[in-house]
Amino acid sequence: MGDSFELHPDVQNTARQIADMDIRGAATIADAAAAALGAQAAECDFDSPDAFRTVMRAAARELEATRPTAVSLPNALRYVLSEMEGETVAALARSVERSVGRFRTDLDNAQDRLGEIGAGRLHDGDTVMTHCHSTDAMACIAAAVRSGTDVSAIVKETRPRNQGHITARELRELDVPVTLIVDNAAHRFLDDVDHLLVGADSIAADGSVVNKIGTAGLAVSARDRGVPVMIAAQSIKLDPKTLTGTTVEIEQRDPTEVLDTDTRDDIGTIAVENPAFDVTPPRHVDAIITEHGQFPPESIVVLMRELFGEDVTEPWIETETSV
Amino acid sequence: MGDSFELHPDVQNTARQIADMDIRGAATIADAAAAALGAQAAECDFDSPDAFRTVMRAAARELEATRPTAVSLPNALRYVLSEMEGETVAALARSVERSVGRFRTDLDNAQDRLGEIGAGRLHDGDTVMTHCHSTDAMACIAAAVRSGTDVSAIVKETRPRNQGHITARELRELDVPVTLIVDNAAHRFLDDVDHLLVGADSIAADGSVVNKIGTAGLAVSARDRGVPVMIAAQSIKLDPKTLTGTTVEIEQRDPTEVLDTDTRDDIGTIAVENPAFDVTPPRHVDAIITEHGQFPPESIVVLMRELFGEDVTEPWIETETSV
Amino acid sequence: MGDSFELHPDVQNTARQIADMDIRGAATIADAAAAALGAQAAECDFDSPDAFRTVMRAAARELEATRPTAVSLPNALRYVLSEMEGETVAALARSVERSVGRFRTDLDNAQDRLGEIGAGRLHDGDTVMTHCHSTDAMACIAAAVRSGTDVSAIVKETRPRNQGHITARELRELDVPVTLIVDNAAHRFLDDVDHLLVGADSIAADGSVVNKIGTAGLAVSARDRGVPVMIAAQSIKLDPKTLTGTTVEIEQRDPTEVLDTDTRDDIGTIAVENPAFDVTPPRHVDAIITEHGQFPPESIVVLMRELFGEDVTEPWIETETSV
Amino acid sequence: MGDSFELHPDVQNTARQIADMDIRGAATIADAAAAALGAQAAECDFDSPDAFRTVMRAAARELEATRPTAVSLPNALRYVLSEMEGETVAALARSVERSVGRFRTDLDNAQDRLGEIGAGRLHDGDTVMTHCHSTDAMACIAAAVRSGTDVSAIVKETRPRNQGHITARELRELDVPVTLIVDNAAHRFLDDVDHLLVGADSIAADGSVVNKIGTAGLAVSARDRGVPVMIAAQSIKLDPKTLTGTTVEIEQRDPTEVLDTDTRDDIGTIAVENPAFDVTPPRHVDAIITEHGQFPPESIVVLMRELFGEDVTEPWIETETSV
Amino acid sequence: MGDSFELHPDVQNTARQIADMDIRGAATIADAAAAALGAQAAECDFDSPDAFRTVMRAAARELEATRPTAVSLPNALRYVLSEMEGETVAALARSVERSVGRFRTDLDNAQDRLGEIGAGRLHDGDTVMTHCHSTDAMACIAAAVRSGTDVSAIVKETRPRNQGHITARELRELDVPVTLIVDNAAHRFLDDVDHLLVGADSIAADGSVVNKIGTAGLAVSARDRGVPVMIAAQSIKLDPKTLTGTTVEIEQRDPTEVLDTDTRDDIGTIAVENPAFDVTPPRHVDAIITEHGQFPPESIVVLMRELFGEDVTEPWIETETSV
Amino acid sequence: MGDSFELHPDVQNTARQIADMDIRGAATIADAAAAALGAQAAECDFDSPDAFRTVMRAAARELEATRPTAVSLPNALRYVLSEMEGETVAALARSVERSVGRFRTDLDNAQDRLGEIGAGRLHDGDTVMTHCHSTDAMACIAAAVRSGTDVSAIVKETRPRNQGHITARELRELDVPVTLIVDNAAHRFLDDVDHLLVGADSIAADGSVVNKIGTAGLAVSARDRGVPVMIAAQSIKLDPKTLTGTTVEIEQRDPTEVLDTDTRDDIGTIAVENPAFDVTPPRHVDAIITEHGQFPPESIVVLMRELFGEDVTEPWIETETSV
């Protein structure tokens, strides 16, 4: 068959939408990618199991190539492919269908479960400081509110993209009292804060937390002021490549986000660095909240080994055999 | 004479301009206030030394009332009035003239001298991180550049008013290579930095540094990353009231500085805290650079006692006697 | 059958004795509760497996309700009930009997095993500082003494209940040289100390140690003085609820423990806070000694997951079906 | 005259009362000792200036010998003797009278002045934690209350002598809301505290604070929790001997203070260490409040050099010449 | 058979060579010991399985006795013996042969695998500081070089045996730019360093790293300067005895290594302490690189439990039964 | 006269000997330089005061040029020249003679006085760790021994020049028990140490201590282990240039000191950095012992301002006028 086969339109569409950021957000991407693999498997008309596997791996590669730095995408693909098994094409297809279903259901439940676990750390009268906007962190506060816990929030605006404003509005919808501050004011307000609660873009096996730029310095401030730091992160944020020492590449964003109307003309003479993320070492974090329970950052590697095993080669990169 | 006398027009104009922030910046305010006192003394037509003193104190009070939280203003007034002496009105006027002259000359020289002292800490190839915009800090870099030292700068934008953009442009005029970053990126770039160099709004006797919001957290980050922190501050920034334990009032700025177009309508439901300054404790500062030399923050009290003595009651508040 | 059945008298008696604190101490409570479940199972005369299970769960609930904050009690009940299995009442009863036996035997051995493990950290000539009275901590010292290691102890009196005096007397019975100090003197004597050795009331999944009030500050002092902190805690002290984020409720004791003859009359005007426990974060602890080996506090979650699994819903709370 | 003269009865009585602790408290002792020297000088009937000096030095030695570890006593004696000057006995006597008067007046004012300075650091709504009972610390709170500042207090009982109960009652008389806690609970309550405010028994030239046992560990806890530490100490607590490196001897108190009814019989088998004081290094202290202003502990040496000069040999130890 | 049998000559020779340090280096010793057990099993002519086991255990004891403090040696023996199983002598021999083969193959691959994992943490342009000479640490740098990463090294000489000179020469062979410094200069150069990379002699279950003397202080310096610390250590360095609390004995080396030509005669009057190793607590280490992936030091206990289980009694110490 | 005069032979000889390091050690250099200035003044045959001053400044410049980085040398010259005053040559000469005499006498007494002050911090039974060889530090131990205090010492060898061996032998002559260790072992032995006692090469106004390479890392270790750090440094080590921000240049020594017989041939391929000194920030130092008393490092600036004033331009650099 060679490379002559065509991937299912859902795979092609999903890949394009992820690339164009029409599909975005760690969980949404993971869900769409799994669904696309399911579509591919369901309508597979090859008759050899080898051909089936080849096509599925090709579909995974197609999807994976769209956002090489996101961590939920390969995690979704790995989950589905690693459960693919059977002697016949029909059996293989059924196994994929099952694992796609299980993955999507788990994903659906994960944030609720995580929210309840995180809410367990919040007490009546507590004030939470947030950085950026994280649906996982919001899930913890929402679960606390649902169970009748009174919390209020100090929300950092989170330059350069001001996602704190989204956080502020969503918290208001939950009737959580909100105080909005500039990022520079965070240290000053930590004395009034009981928890620092942020999300994560990915989490490494050495317990480091990769999150929106500003998190690392904020966590240092929190330690100085005696404020515990909790990270809310579904397990699709755990990065299996880091089990083998690979460190996370930090993405740079557009310099114009940093310039204002006065300095925009100075581009070229004034350099701009605009990294999207930074890395908080585990010694500045108190707990990582996942849907599998809470962990000190130093032992998140245990959950990673449970979920991914020790061999983290990517199942879609295996040598293809021609059909 | 009672309260029937009128203050000199220069006093009235200067007071108004300071109040309206047409005259701004610690040194500029101090200079103008001293000059106004000089004008008042020069054209005094009272014949009793007591009346002269009463008028001078009234002029000082008028000026002092315009910006109760600035520290250079009362320092200028205190300097001039504390040197006022003589048996006759003429002698008193001459003494004021002399002290106004001396104060203004010293002020003129202070920033240059401070700049040279601060430049002594900068070495060829060093990278300096700045926060906000401080003419004292700029003087250190400018002096280093003048003496042939190659330095480059990482400049924080300094929300909410983005004074970092002023700093960036002024450094470019000195041909200092500049990299502009958002405040949230500061911690991440501290590993590339040899000095944190900032100014001060005022300095307290316990060694605390009051400076633009964001300084305190940045200094904690600098300690975590092993970067020394230098504060450039002329002695008119030393706050004599703090010798007697008084702590500095932190001014709040307009909440609309924090809101953006999306959240502006939420005012009332979303609270905003927008403090102008924060307080960095001496243990997070390595050196305070003044025109009288450099000091560890823990011994700046020594310079304050040299300059102000132990008795820091304000000379313009003494009981008035009628003319 | 509804609620019409009566629980076995042993269950009723044990529940009452636990409630009245006639049965006290984590291990003693756990042992008695397991034995009571065994008695209930042994004399069960129902003929339906469902009825058997219903009664067993009711017995567990009866026992569990007596001390809602102790952690060894639900751990004992969970252990016994989670191993209950069989198709017939007889098989179910046998399974309970077996698991009760195993639990009690393990419990019996656990402290000895823990003591030997903890003794491995103590060397000839070492001085140990203790806080409160902990049979697990005592087991470590006793095992060291038995194996010929010369240790001496500095014993904090541990206000308000002075359990240090019990520790002092028991150490004297082991011929360990003892120096008794007030709690306030602890920091001063840490320079003479090689280990801080304390027990725990419960241990959370985030590595936090809940122990007698005073432990958290002492551990901060120990870190400041370079003294390692070891916690001796059998695995029945591990709190499965904390795997899901729940934090431990801190019990308040009687205010009169704090007042003396002079202040007793001031109650009402002078408030008293008398919390029984405090929480030491894992970064101030060096090792937790259990009967399953020693663990850094950050990885005690691993042992908790081995022992309790991820699903920590309480087996006695399942919906009852009528008999 | 040799040693044949008799000291004034006031000197003898005062010495006895200090030795018997009928006169106690740093300021009270200093005041009484100065007064006794005044009495000695007033009724001196020798006709040679040398004899006068000899007697005055002998009186000072008599007084100084009563409490060799108190620091206010030699400070009072030093102050009076170092100002003794004149060509005639009458002139000498007048100089002593003057210096005694000045010393006692200054002492009288010092605590009020210190209180106002310390009150400057307390803000409306602040909570202060206290350790032991210190009239200097009380003066700060009293001054704050007088000026209308709302403060509340968390009071440590301060084993073994429970001076916290005195503090609690005195604060109630000032209508300050008080919560009494055991010493072991201090760390746990630091999160609710804005200032740690304690007195001092003496202060050394290296910035170390010698205070009631428990202070050093509490200050470590305060740093860990981000709570600033203020020490209220009149300048008679500054120890001139430490300018030349001498370290302070720590007094041991009666072991029976530590034992209770159960352990009292174990004396001999259970050793007791009961030091009265401990030493807090300057890096754990934020400010020392004196009647001369506030100082970072690292620069209290400056005030000591102002007050005592560099040569701190004790004026009453000079070689005597016979009368 | 009693003790009358003779061990295989390979066992005897290997034991002698290890004792004489002709065979040295953790991996080389482990490999040789496993091979010797293989030789013993291959030529066993006893006909009873019990006799076979007895002989194998005797061989293990013989080998183990040669270097009681090395950790790779008992790890090799434990691995081989714990997989010995079978009903017949032939089956037993085959099982030993298989486990010897697997152990030696794994050992062969482990350093390469570890090197690749460690190399994942090194980036283009990074500078690495090394202490002593470690083949595991070298493997990380070599793998980085192989994959085209430009790294340079600052190499501590590592008194008293100057193993840094070996490291320097081997790095030069890899074309890595090397700067050699004395140990005392390490702190000063940490500001130019991106990683501290060292090996380990053994690693304990509490996350402590036993390595060449000087490591512990260097790691403290690295934390002060913000430099992450990575430990490269194959899993044969993990010490199973420490799972049960036993702490590692620190070997003393010859005092003449410390003396020079001038002081050599002073031996006897000048004491010398020359410990070979020190212990770095986990809070000063960022990651341990093994062939099974990287771990925060606080969770290395997880890998130890996977590899060794909870029961770490030594299989060669079981009671013998006569043949 | 122009430049035609010749300097006194003593000036020329002393300059040569200092340059050749025949005269070495801070105090010896200072003493010799002062003596040379005295010789120059004594035999001055010019008749104009201006000429006298010109010659004296030229002599100072000649001496100062020999070791531009030593700090005691310019301090000696500054002291002598700043006291030069008079209307006639004879008066000028007498003033120089007096100031030379006073300087040399003070210098003579300074180390004894410093030793007594430092000894005040050492108690019976204390163990002191030393680094390098410092006569000021030795003076403290010697004074303690003279006054009957039992101290013992742990002596670091101090690579690359092993000055610790000199310290070890001198301590043995004082009958102080000595244990010699390699530098790498220092951290491990700090738990047995009561004081870290080192000298200084120079001390800066910001409280930084410049001392033999290795001091900065050792002080970090001492803080980690809770060991106080004392610096013994006569006031001739205080560097007046640092009052105005200038930082100290760190001298590099010969790379062959670092290489051994094996690596000596690799020079060129293996780079060597061999800095003589490093800089310890004040936050890692507890006390600086001078002959004027002890100071926290943060207030040594006070003594510097007393000794040098604020204007630290070098008196020998003033514009010359021709004779």
Image (cartoon, coloured by chain):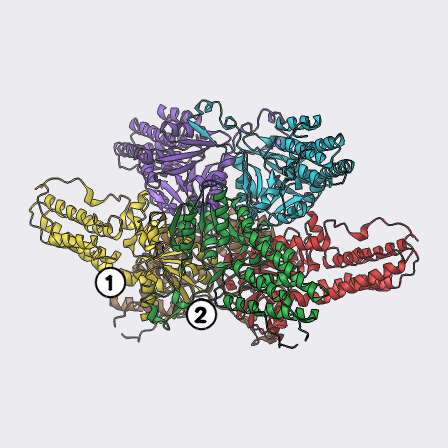
Chain colours: A purple, B cyan, C yellow, D green, E brown, F red
Quadrant of residue E52 within the rendered picture: bottom left
Q: In the rendered structure, the residue with mark 2 lies on which chain?
A: E
| Residue type of the residue flagged with mark 1 | Thr
Callout 2 secondary element = helix
Q: Is residue E149 above or below residue B165?
A: below
Q: Is residue B224 above or below residue B20?
A: below
| Residue C160 horizontal side relative to residue E196, left or right | left
Residue sitting at x 84%, y 48%: F319
Q: CA distance from mark 1 to mark 2?
A: 33 Å
Q: Position of residue A240 (x, y in %)?
A: 40, 41
Residue with the mark numbered 2: E19
Q: Quadrant of the N terminus of chain A?
A: top left
Q: Is residue A64 above or below residue B294?
A: above
- Between D165 and A191, the one lying in front of the other is D165
Callout 1 secondary element = loop
| Residue B144 horizontal side relative to residue E74, left or right | right
Q: Disc 1 vs disc 2: which is toward the camera?
A: 2
Total residue callouts: 2
For the residue carrying disc 2, how many other residues have a C-alpha within 10 Å: few (<14), some (14-19), or many (20+)?
A: some
- Between C159 and B270, the one lying in front of the other is C159
| Residue type of the residue flagged with mark 2 | Ala
Q: Is residue F235 above or below residue A306?
A: below
Q: Position of residue C234 (x, y in %)?
A: 29, 57
Question: Can residue F281 be spotted in the picture?
Answer: no
Residue with the mark numbered 1: E88
- Same chain letter for marks 1 and 2: yes
For the residue carrying disc 1, how many other residues have a C-alpha within 10 Å: few (<14), some (14-19), or many (20+)?
A: some
- Identify the mark at residue F250; answer none if there is no mark: none
Q: Position of residue C245 (x, y in %)?
A: 33, 43
- Between C282 and B25, the one lying in front of the other is B25
Q: In the rendered structure, the residue with mark 1 lies on which chain?
A: E
Q: Position of residue F308 (x, y in %)?
A: 73, 54
